[in-house]
Image (cartoon, grey):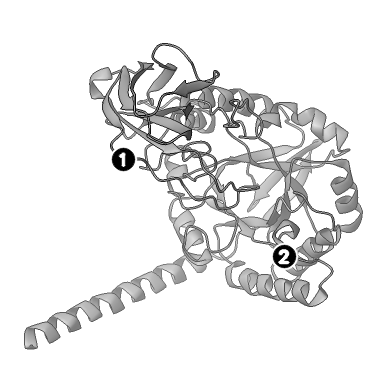
Amino acid sequence: MKTLRLTSIIFLTFLISACQFDQNETLDIMAKGPSHSEVRNVDGKYRLFVNGEEFFVKGAGCEFGPCHLVADHGGNSFRTWRVDNSRESGREVLDQAYEHGLMVMMGLDVARERHGFDYDDEEAVAAQLEQFKEEVMELKDHPALLGWGIGNELNLRYTNKRVWDAVNDIARMIKEVDGNHVTTTMLAGIGPNEVAYIEENCPDIDFLSIQFYGDIVNLPQRLKEANYDGPYLVTEWGATGHWEVEETKWGSPIEQTSTEKAATIKKRYKKAILGDEKNCMGSYVFLWGQKQERTPSWYGLFTEAGEKTEAINVMEYFWTGEWPEHMAPRVYDFTIEGKGGRFDNVVLSKSTEYSAQFKVEHSDNQSLSVRAEIMPEPVELSDGGDYEPRPETIEGLILSANDSGIGFKAPEEEGAYRVFVYITDEHNHAATVNIPFYVK
């Protein structure tokens, strides 16, 4: 009993010491004082400045992911969608960023009309403003704070333009209680109606942030059509969206391989982000982590298991000017029984065995490992990046797997499915590929 009591005392002492250490560390960080960010026009070009120095955003959107690894690959910032990000408090997010030399575009999770919020309800709007004031007051003096992202894609399927009045009220509040940091709001695409209203009625928004996927290649034209010639960040971009690709005849979208995603991300960054030297102040690639949205591999630059895909190699090249020493595997030509590639309609017989082939390119094929899984297509589909439940993997269907192909058995029940393959190496890299198929 005495031993147990002594152990408890020692453990409690350790916890108190750890808490005191964390508090002291946070106090040391806060002693640095707040950062200061602003937009300047330098020789006809818009530039973001942090503490008096030009700051081109080399960033990633990060939620439930290893945000600090952005620094390991040459990035200088990450953005969040809300203050409590990755199940951490805003202070913890900023502390982690500071420890790794990163700046944070902190998101304020403004309520969306498509989720049922009524911007004609003055009491609800006022309560939301008061909530954000508390969040801003808590974090405004942190040296890792870059700015405030007020809402995410509030123009997606909305009708009430009073949402922009609420956004400006939040921005005005930030100017009053903070005053050191830029304010922006993240738009789904960009259109003339929103631009005209915001420019006329929202003077406290410093610049617009824009979010495109496949359509980012048309960014100059979209800006021209929207009559916007001001500064901007691209705060979401990356793989081609699931709404922008071809589908099977039963409605399953065709996902790019990780190799195809890396190639398109390379092309889009060079053309869209680096191509506009006058107005673009940088970007946040999506997503530094992983999420389920139509598939578990569609948007994440990491796999569910935490492996890095080739797209991270591409971003490191753009952020640092050099390719990493170790590159992720590349995958090509995934077919089932030598036919029915990803852009065909693959129909299989239930409970029947099949083989699938692919080609892999890597500096050391001996180091590669392969795993695979089959799952039904999701039934509960999300909208605008909302939560989507991941379908359960069907166990027992993968019969074999190596670096040239897999053997599997089709599910017993009729319906839409997808087979996933992950090719990994000893450096925690992965190539991903999948084929949707239908069982009759």
Question: What residue do we see at 36% from left, 34% from top?
Answer: 373
Left or right: 113 in relation to 404? right
Question: What residue do we see at 7% from left, 88% from top?
Answer: 2
Q: Inspect this view and state whether residue 31 appears.
A: no
Q: Quadrant of the N terminus?
A: bottom left
Question: For mark 2, what is the residue?
Answer: 179
Observer-nearest of 46 and 69: 69
Left or right: 13 in relation to 325? left
Q: Amino acid at mark 2?
A: Gly
Mark before the other along the chain sequence, 2 or 1: 2
The answer to the question of whether label 2 and label 1 lie on touching residues, with beta carbons closer than 8 A, is no
Q: Amino acid at mark 1?
A: Glu
Image height of 369 relative to 195, above or below: above
Callout 2: helix, strand or loop?
loop
Q: Residues within 10 Å of mark 1 (few under 14, many from 20)?
A: few
Question: What residue do we see at 58% from left, 46% from top?
Answer: 381
Q: Residues within 10 Å of mark 2 (few under 14, many from 20)?
A: some
Left or right: 120 in relation to 218? right
